[in-house]
Amino acid sequence: MPEIVVSAEKRTEKGKNVNRRLRVSGRIPGVLYGGSKEPVPVAVSPKDISAVLRSASGENTLFDLDLGGSRRKVILKEYQIEPIKGKLLHADFYEVALDKLLEVKVHVEVTGTPVGVKVQGGILDFVTRELEIECLPTDIPDKIVVDVSELELGKHIRVSDLKLSDKLTMLTEPDIVIVHVVAPRAEEVVATAAVEGAEAEAAGATAEPEVIKKGKAEEGDEKPEKGEKKEKK
């Protein structure tokens, strides 16, 4: 994987108006954290941070933050996105030591079509989409892949069923369910039956007026008003 370098510069001014002007100039505010060092306010290009997020490791990508010619190994600590236009507003970084273990959350990717879905008519329920692990910064995986091809109806895969590299330590509780195959919900079956029943009633309602037209109303009987031929259920 090619080395990623993000240029940064120290910020000396703070405040909403300052940050607003910074964004107008094409940069966003951020803070560099790490170890026992004091947090350092920085400014970076949102395009550079977007490139990091689009990489294979996403927010767990290990990269260099070039601060005035001094490079620091960092990962994204957190970032803020404007909800409407999706623009990056802020990014915080965490400086890491390559020889010290780090706790990170890694996305889960499911692969394959379960037997319980393909043959037994079940539904795959993807319950846990992120797992927490501990490892060295250079060993952070892009994702954790779970093969569900052999998963049958009523069966599940728990965290304890995963086989990880010796370089990774799982921190998520072992009994947590990641995926399972379940039967279609009872409400869905009822809803299907209700639709079929409504279609049958509609067909019957269409045929009824023809029967009424063929017969004469008994003397003294009131003619049914329109819409009163059939009670709504």
Image (spheres, rainbow, N blue to C red):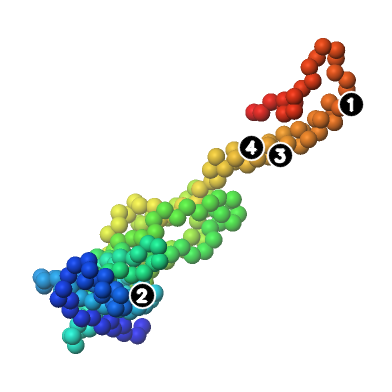
Mark 1 or mark 3, whichever is nearer to me? 1
Q: Is residue 147 left or right of residue 122?
A: left
The secondary structure type at the circle numbered 2 is helix
The secondary structure type at the circle numbered 4 is helix
The secondary structure type at the circle numbered 1 is helix
Label 4, label 1: how many angstroms apart (C-alpha)? Answer: 31 Å
Q: Is residue 145 left or right of residue 114?
A: left
Label 1, label 3: how many angstroms apart (C-alpha)? Answer: 24 Å
**Which residue was labeled with disc 2?**
50
**Which residue was labeled with disc 3?**
199
Q: Residue at x 36, y 83 (%)?
A: 1
Q: Residue at x 49, y 65 (%)?
A: 111
The secondary structure type at the circle numbered 3 is helix
**Which residue was labeled with disc 1?**
214
Nearer to the camera, 177 or 88: 88
Residue 77: % across, % down: 25, 68
* Residue ranking furthest to the bottom: 69
Q: Is residue 172 above or below residue 210?
A: below
**Which residue was labeled with disc 4?**
194
Query: Across the whole image, how many numbered discs are drawn on residues?
Result: 4
Q: Residue at x 29, y 73 (%)?
A: 23
